[in-house]
Amino acid sequence: MSGERILKPFLRITILALTVALGSSALAQDTPQRIHREKEQMRSPAVSPDGATLVYSVWEEKRYAHKLRVLSIGKRVKASDNGWGVGAAFSPDGSQLLYLSEAKGDGKYWITVASADGKSPRDLRFEGSNPEGNPPSWSPSGQEILLINPAGTYLIPVVGAEGRRITVKTLGNASWSPDGKQIVYELKGGGISTLTVESGDIDGITRSRVGLSANWSPSGQHIAWIEDDEAVVFDVKSGKRTKVGPAIRVVWTHEGGGLLLLTETGGFTEGATGPIPDLAVQWTSLNGTEKLAIELPKVHAVITGENGRTLFFTVTGDGLYRMKLPALPGAQEGAVTPTEPVDKTKPKLPMKRPGNRKIDADTLKAIQ
């Protein structure tokens, strides 16, 4: 039943609010609610900016493809299956849905744009990358789509057939800056760099052994990534870094004022395509004065909506849960206190760029 509050005994969720700053009051807590039952693995979930629509994919063995499932979240949750695809993402204004379509049944993924409910799909003719690696993503303006494949990195207009290659590099786990001028990504062999979209210039941030899950804060002031199983927050202006705790992935909340730190519990749940690691979640304000340790057994994906104030998490074999994150009294996005010295060794990486070469759809397919 949608919207039910009863949790299964083995999925009981305990929330402990901890206040670190002396004299502060405990954060207000919200009770997680299961809002939708789903026995299948909910792959690549995405939520609209207003938190009213959620999309995910389930594996259909007979069709040997992913079915696109759309949830309308209100007093009751309504589910509808609209097409075949995976790797969905909402446009910045929430009016359109981008995903990799499997409708042709040829074993390939094709970039498709549809209305927010998954209807009226429009094939952009470009073959997309594997959704497990670098699924396509919207530019902050919502006018272009970032496509990454072995031939390089491209910007594809939502309207029109031409695309342009911004670099011959295949950017790993790319994330846009909020102003759309730069992209942060992982280097092969470890490290984090940024690429300026207009010029193709590349600037190295770190050459450390490992840099994973890099993404910009909503304000653009910070970049967070994983380094040696620790979450690191990088101040773009000063170059200062802060280690904020163990994690395998980070998610920004509160428009950049907080972070979700995801860690593996050591347990696994069998999914449609193999074992899925069980995750635990801890939330922290960026300035470290507020923390919320959340024990979420059998959580396999976490996403946020409503400017990072609402948390959605999926539980394979059970369904979708939702909870409101606490408000941040006085915590500001830029208030992080560094715990590491400034890194003054930011290397300027050697670069050969294609000069923003324009390329049409047929040529792009030919070089893939």
Image (cartoon, grey):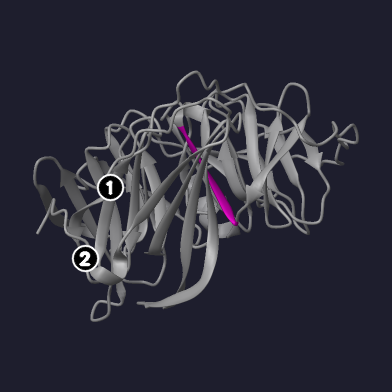
**In which quadrant of the rendered image does the N terminus lie?**
bottom left
User: Quadrant location of residue 341?
Assistant: top right
Local crowd at mark 2 within 10 Å, few (<14), some, or many (≥20)? Answer: some
Look at the image and tell me whether residue 317 can be seen. no
Q: Is residue 307 visible?
A: yes
Lateral position of residue 61 relative to residue 192, left or right: left
Horizontal relation, residue 329 to residue 155: left or right: left
- Residue at left offset 63%, top offset 24%: 221
Which circle marks residue 60 in the picture? none
| Chain part drawn in magenta | 248-253
Residue 322 shows which numbered tag? Answer: 1
State the image coordinates of residue 147 (x, y, percent, origin top left): 52, 47
Q: Position of residue 97 (x, y in %)?
A: 31, 43
* Residue drawn at point x = 30 percent, y = 56 percent: 56
Image location (x, y in percent) of residue 50: 28, 32
Mark 1 residue element: strand
Horizontal side of residue 29 vs 71, given as left or right: right
| Magenta stretch, main secondary structure class | strand
Amino acid type of the residue tagged 2 in the rendering: Glu
| Mark 2 lies on residue | 38
Picture coordinates of residue 146, whole percent (x, y): 52, 42
Front residue of 228/137: it is: 228
